[in-house]
Image: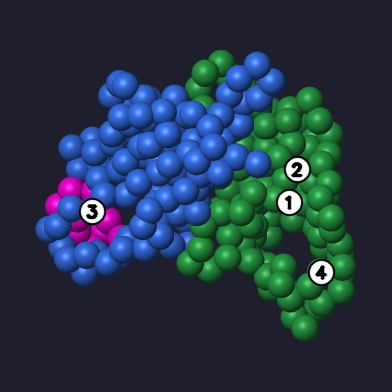
Chain colours: A green, B blue
């Protein structure tokens, strides 16, 4: 059974700081890993998706890396802004055939202080 | 990119009533859709897998008679919470699988917040 852990559970940083969010998973046989953002009371916004064959993906100030063998992914946010405040979720999709159950972490709640 | 919509985005209902939530893939056909539920301060948990034209597959612990899923077309799946109770209050999110020769991706809807009074 896949388990996804996100550390830290909460993070507060001053504006402008670079930061790293961590995601670890127990089963390395994954199809892909996806990072989402969730604002309070809102739905999911997909940030980055990394296929199992990839090592990293970048979008603007965001960079996500994947180390399948060690069961880890990091989301790097450069020059953080107050608008980045949200909960960041990591989701892992298994690589086993047609089984599609995505396992989510509980998230890291980020607060960027102006 | 592909878009998945949900309707309504939020709903408040009285205990004992039924509520239907729609999930639509707007620009692609999805033979498989998924329904997730998120309780406060918990992660999203898969409730069921919805397959077009066949019965849904429910995860362990999810009551199929309470959470009715219908996937009648390639672009629409519905989740009906029957005889809703306050403990059913949650955030419900669907996703749709888009796959073909060069793609196999799940796209998530914006979610529906259900509050049962």
Q: CA distance from mark 3 to mark 1?
A: 37 Å
**Which mark's residue is nearer the viewer, 4 or 1?**
4
Q: CA distance from mark 4 to mark 1?
A: 16 Å
Q: Estimate the x, y position of residue A41 in percent, counting from the top left.
A: 48, 67
Residue placed under numbered mark 2 in the picture = A73
The segment highlighted magenta reads B81-89
Lower sequence index among marks 4 and 1: 1
Q: Residue furthest front?
A: B27
Q: CA distance from mark 4 to mark 3?
A: 40 Å
Task: Tell me which chain the residue with mark 3 is part of.
Answer: B
Q: CA distance from mark 4 to mark 2?
A: 19 Å
Q: Estimate the x, y position of residue B49 in percent, counting from the top left.
A: 39, 31
Lower sequence index among marks 2 and 1: 1
Whether labels 3 and 2 belong to a single chain: the reply is no
Point out which mark residue A80 bears: 4
Residue for point 77% across, 83% down: A114
Which quadrant of the structure image shows residue A102? top right
10 Å crowding of disc 4: few (<14), some (14-19), many (20+): many
Q: Estimate the x, y position of residue A97 in percent, counting from the top left.
A: 56, 16
The answer to whether residue B53 of the structure is visible from this angle is: yes
Task: Tell me which chain the residue with mark 1 is part of.
Answer: A
Contact? badges 4 and 1 (CB < 8 Å)? no
Residue placed under numbered mark 1 in the picture = A22
**Which mark's residue is nearer the viewer, 4 or 3?**
3
Q: Estimate the x, y position of residue B40 in percent, counting from the top left.
A: 43, 62
């Amino acid at each position: 059974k896949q388990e996804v852990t996100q550390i830290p559970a909460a993070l507060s940083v001053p504006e402008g700081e670079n930061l790293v969010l961590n995601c670890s998973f127990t089963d390395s046989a994954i199809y892909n890993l996806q990072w989402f953002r969730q604002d309070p009371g809102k739905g999911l916004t997909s940030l980055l998706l990394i296929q199992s064959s990839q090592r990293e993906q970048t979008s603007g100030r965001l960079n996500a890396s994947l180390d399948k063998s060690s069961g880890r992914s990091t989301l790097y946010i450069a020059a953080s802004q107050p608008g980045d405040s949200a909960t960041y979720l990591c989701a892992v999709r298994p690589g086993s055939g047609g089984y599609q159950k995505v396992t989510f972490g509980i998230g890291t709640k980020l607060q960027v202080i102006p | 990119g592909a878009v998945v919509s949900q309707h309504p985005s939020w709903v408040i209902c009285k205990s004992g009533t039924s509520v239907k939530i729609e999930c639509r893939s707007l620009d692609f056909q999805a033979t498989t859709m998924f329904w997730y539920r998120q309780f406060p301060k918990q992660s999203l948990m898969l409730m069921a897998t919805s397959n077009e034209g066949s019965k849904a597959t429910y995860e362990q612990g999810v009551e199929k008679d309470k959470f009715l899923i219908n996937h009648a077309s390639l672009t629409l799946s519905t989740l009906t919470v029957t005889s809703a109770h306050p403990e059913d209050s949650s955030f419900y999110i669907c996703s749709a699988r888009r796959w073909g020769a060069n793609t196999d991706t799940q796209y998530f809807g914006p979610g529906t917040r259900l509050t049962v009074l």
